[in-house]
Each structure stands twice: as C-alpha cells, then as structure tokens.
Amino acid sequence: MRSPRRRRVVAGLLLAPALTCCFASGGGSSGGGSADGSRLRVALAFPPAENFSPYGADATLLSRLGVTEGLTALDANGAAAPALAQSWTRENDRNWLFTLREATFQDGTDVTPAAVAAALTHATEARPVTPALAGVTLTAKKSGDRQVRVTTENPDPALPLRLAGPGLAILSAKAYAGKRVNPVGAATGPFELTEVTGTTAATLDRYDDYWGGRAQAPGIDARFIADGTARTNALRTGQVDVAEAVPVSQASTLTRGTRHETATTRTTSLLLNTRNGAFKDPELRAAAREAVDGSVLAKDVYEGHADPGVGVFGPAVTWAAGKRPALAGRAEAADPAGTAITVATYDNRPELPEVAQVLQQQLKKAGFEVKLEVREYSRLESDALAGKFDAFVGARNSLLDTGDPVSILASDFTCDGGYNLALLCDKKVDRAVADAQKESDTAERQRAALKAEAAVLATDATVPLVHQRIITGVGTSVRGVLLDPYERA
C-alpha cells in the first residue's frame, strides 16, 4: 500500500501521467487508490505511427496514455517537477546529479541508476534525433546507489525541462533487447500497454505497483479514430468516455457539461519547404506569407475557438506577449506568376483540411497554382520530412517536447533539427538559437528565445496561422479529469 503522502505528491503534478488514471467512469471513490472505477474508454485522434516507438511521434501517445514517464515532469507553470527523479542539483555548467525515487518497471525490475543511464544512452543514439535532444549531446552514468549524473557537452540550463520530454522516457533493459525499442511491459507509468491491434486500438491495464499509488481505473481501452466527427459521435452515443480533439464543427453537438475547451500552446502553421522547389526562393516565401490571412481562419474555420497567429509562441505563452522584437531582413514578395505548389496536410485534426482549402484560395488569389495533398498523419510525416511537398499545414504544440521555448526552435528550425518540416538551414537562425541555449536565467532565456523566434520568422520558413484552443469531450460519468495545456496527459 502506497502512502497517502506519496499519492498527494503525484496529484500535485499537473502533467504527471498519474492524472490520466484519476479518470473514473461509473463509480467508486477515488481515495486511497481504490479499484472501484471502471475501465476508461478513450478515443484518440492519432494512431501509433511508429509501432509505439518512444522516440518519435508516438512518444507523446505513450505519455498521454500513462504508460511512460521521465526523470522529470512539467508543473502547471511549465517548470520542471519531480517524476522518477525526486530531486536534482546542478554541480557545475555541464554536470547535473539526479536522485532517484524508489520505483519499479512494469516487468518487475527496479528503477536503478544503471537502468536509467542505459535508457538515456539509448535515447541519445536514436535516429532521427528525438526532439528533446535537438542540438544537445549528453551522457548519463550511474553515481552511487540512487543517483545518476547527466553531463552535457555544452552548458544546458534547461536540462531538467528537457528530461521531461516524452522522448526521454525511462524504460527497462527489456525494451532494448530486440531490433526495435519496445515499451510493452518495460515502462514505469500507472498503466501498462498489454495489447495493440494494429493502428486501430490498444489495451492498457493498471500497473498496481506504480510508485505514485494505484490508479482507480483498472485499465484503459483506447481507440484510434482519425475522423473527428466519428470521435465525437462515439462520445455522444456512449461508446467512449473521453474523446480528444473534437472538431469545432462538432462542438455545438455536445452539451455544456461534456464540452471542455482548453487554451494550449498549440500553433497551426504553414511551413514552407526552403530546401527545394518553389519556396527555396525567399521572395516566393514572402509572397505566400503576404497572401495568408490568419484572422479569416480563426473566425471561419475555427469558429472563434482560436486566435490569429502571431508567432511560434501564441497567447497561451504569456511571457511572450508584448515583448517580441521587430523583424528585420525579410525578403520582398515576388509575383508568383502561376508558380505551381503542392500543399500537404493531415485529417486527424479535421480543421486542417479546411484550413488548407482556405489557404488554397488565398494563395491562388495571390497568383500561385495550388494542389492539395491530404492524408492520415502516419502516412504523411516521412514524406514531409523528406521534402516531398512545397508546403505543409500542421498543428504543433510549441512546448510539448520539453517545456523549453528554445528547444522547440532547435528541433523545428535549425540545420540539425529532428523535426524540421521546413527543412530550414539558416546561419542566423542557428546562431540565435545557440545564443539562447546558453542562457540560464529564466527571463533572459525567454528574451533570447523571442530573438531566435524573430530570426525564424524573418526567413518566412513558417507562417503562423492560428493559435488553437483544444476541445475535449468528456462523458458525464467521468470524474476527476484535468485537461492538460501541454497535451501530454
């Protein structure tokens, strides 16, 4: 039996996966780790794209389902909070010492310094680079019975934030025994992934020895439903208890008690392929930027459930408001003169195809010839990263991977970025991001991040369209739901 104090510690972490297990459908008190709840049925928008690999897009899916966790988590203010590490100290510019709490993996083995160091080492070797490690080189080694020393090649003031990234989940040795990393039965979260039915469903059972206390729900039955209307209907007809990413077009079909709206750090952007094709030309990128009107998208496509795009970081990132430097060095727009382009997007978020259609009209009016390519996300990502489209319309949570604003810029817009859909490689951007990475003071790091954001925007590699508010459908029989602005849990 876990102590009440330990359970309260977990409950205080807004983003800890344990909160997923606090959801209870149909009965029982949640106190004392009760097993009185029924299985939670959830409809998720994105199916596993990489066989539940912890290093790509599926890392967030694993975190969201309460399967994996890292050394740290993020609290309500976006600061690093304890998870598998109960505390840490910074020994010098490059060395951090993390003290582990007593915990076990789902295969029954102990979470030891050696196991944690091995897990972090595997993460550093993953290719492509997991987003949380973009531009960062680190090593991890056992230090005594309960501690792990993490050393970075260069000073990294944001390391505790970085280690909260879903891509840096700690797994047991079992996970790395095969040809691919397999988190089944090898993670530490309150729920264990027990069965996967292709890309359509997954079954999770409660892990009774979870360090934070037993979940109330004995398990989770997850269905992956890319169609937003179908997800909403599944909730309305009682087939699921929670439906994520309800389309704005379906919001009015849910009663006030089941419709929940959350301001998030998610931005929908038009990313322009700067490496090859039409938008290799900065003047044509400028023409695309001038053609786009995000206020139309916010009003018409998102029906007021979004704000017009102002940058990589939107209104939910409150420290950015009113502090952005002026942009300099932008190219002058050229006449597209019938230039043919292909704009790709995915339909897991049903607003995106509608956004793409409006953009098609706006770009055509400016003089482009526009072809749209719409697929399910798992069938689109690899082609987008390979530069097979001229432009990509995507929704990205700017603080998802680490909570550190500099890290998202490094991942998405630097030459070595692991999720660089714009294929941007610009010396000024890389230099600005590198300067920001050196800052340890929180306020100075934020100011430097805004300078780096300005350098990115000046290239017109990305055109921020809208900043989203996420609508989640929650059944009336579900209690204890806490909606996560970082979309990790």
Image: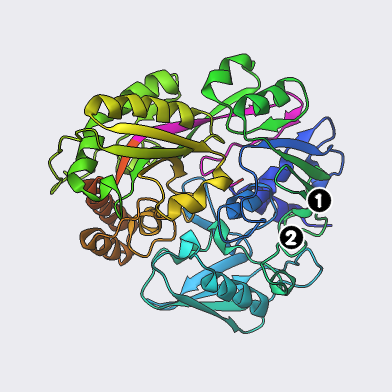
Along the horizontal axis of the image, is 4 left or right of 37? left
Give the residues drawn in magenta, as a range.
465-488
Q: Which of marks 2 and 1 is nearer the N terminus?
A: 1
Quarter of the image where the N terminus is located: bottom right
Q: Residue 461's x, y, as percent?
A: 29, 47
Tell me which residue sits at (60%, 77%) in the image. Answer: 117
Residue drawn at the location 26% of the way across and 56% of the way down: 448
Res 313 seen here: no
Please name whichever residue, 227 or 261, is drawn nearer the observer in this view of the structure: 227
Q: In which quarter of the image is residue 462?
A: top left
Residue 232 covered by magenta stretch: no
What is the number of the mark on residue 427?
none
Query: What amino acid does circle 2 point to?
Result: Trp
Q: Distance between the residues labelled 2 and 1?
A: 12 Å
Residue farthest right in this picture = 36
Q: Residue at x 64, y 15 (%)?
A: 255
**Secondary structure type for disc 2:** loop
Mark 2 — residue? 211
Residue 57, position in %: x, y? 56, 52
> What residue would you read off at disc 1?
206
